[in-house]
């Protein structure tokens, strides 16, 4: 009797993989400031630049629209969304609430191993003070590790959604070495509260950290005219 055939998992279609790649590359370009708010996304131009067909590019643009990063402008087409001043203020207010909550939950739930990892990441960030790209990556990993330590899936989804919208603002405030030094000191305060298992203090200092990042962002945007909506 022939052995039963194992069920094969169908490999993703090449265009599906290309669509995912196109989406991530466009996200990266938005985050780096290569694609600025107001930039029109032309399918043919993007497909040629990325070396793929138009279909995955179209899928990537639709996903960016679902994320709230792209809007359709009449007689123009798909365009990177522009945030007005009020939206920037609201985003950072929500970020302070969400990340403050993450720090409070992490003070109760984080393992010693996770706290040690956060300490190591902060030390690496200190050493990467003059490397803007590495500072950005390490800071992002620090906040992601703390969020994971909070053990709340719904909070994670909310933070992920907010972070995607913040990508529209372009390059990180950590591109300035002064801000890196400040962030390291602020992270250290959060770590002190985590080690002490002081949930209220962890939330307080994380909120202050996000408020400092907010002020740095507004300084960075002074050279950009933000529409007041």
Image (cartoon, rainbow, N blue to C red):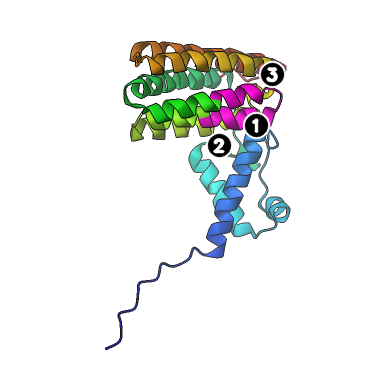
Element class at badge 2: loop
Cα distance, mark 2 to mark 1? 24 Å
Residue for point 68% across, 24% down: 175
Cα distance in 3D space between marks 2 and 3: 28 Å
Q: Nearer the viewer, residue 80 or 197?
A: 197
Image x and y of residue 43, in percent: 66, 52
Instruction: Locate the C terminus by quadrant.
Output: top right
Give the residue pinned by disc 2. 69
- Residue carrying label 3: 177
x then y, percent, for residue 120: 53, 27
Dominant SS type (magenta)? helix
Q: Which residues are magenta?
A: 122-141
Residue 206 seen in the figure: no
In the picture provided, is 194 more to the left or to the right than 29?
Answer: left
Q: Nearer the viewer, residue 16 or 7?
A: 7
Q: Is residue 199 visible?
A: yes
Task: Identify the secondary structure beneath mark 1.
Answer: helix
Q: Which mark is residue 134?
A: 1
* Residue 19 magenta-highlighted: no
Quarter of the image containing the N terminus?
Answer: bottom left
Q: Are marks 3 and 1 in contact (CB under 8 Å)?
A: no
Percent across and percent down for residue 156 are 40, 33
Frontmost residue, 73 versus 140 = 140
CB under 8 Å between discs 2 and 3: no
Dot 3 surroundings within 10 Å: few (below 14), some, or many (20 or more)? some
């Amino acid at each position: 009797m022939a052995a039963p055939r194992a069920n094969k998992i169908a490999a993703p279609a090449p265009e599906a993989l290309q669509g995912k790649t196109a989406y991530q590359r466009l996200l990266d370009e938005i985050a780096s400031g290569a694609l600025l708010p107001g930039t029109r996304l032309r399918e043919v131009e993007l497909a040629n630049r990325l070396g793929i067909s138009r279909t995955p590019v179209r899928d990537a643009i639709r996903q960016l629209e679902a994320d709230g990063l792209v809007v359709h402008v009449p007689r123009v087409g798909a365009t990177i969304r522009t945030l007005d001043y009020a939206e920037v203020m609201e985003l950072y207010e929500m970020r302070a609430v969400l990340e403050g909550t993450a720090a409070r939950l992490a003070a109760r739930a984080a393992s010693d191993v996770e706290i040690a990892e956060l300490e190591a990441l902060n030390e690496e960030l200190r050493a990467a003070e003059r490397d803007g790209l590495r500072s950005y990556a390490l800071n992002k990993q620090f906040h992601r590790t703390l969020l994971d330590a909070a053990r709340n899936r719904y909070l994670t989804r909310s933070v992920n959604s907010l972070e995607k919208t913040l990508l529209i603002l372009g390059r990180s405030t950590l591109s300035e070495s002064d801000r890196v030094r400040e962030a390291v000191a602020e992270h250290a305060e959060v770590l002190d509260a985590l080690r002490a298992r002081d949930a209220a203090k962890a939330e307080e200092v994380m909120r202050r950290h996000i408020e400092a990042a907010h002020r740095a962002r507004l300084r960075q945007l002074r050279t950009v005219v933000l529409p007041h909506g």
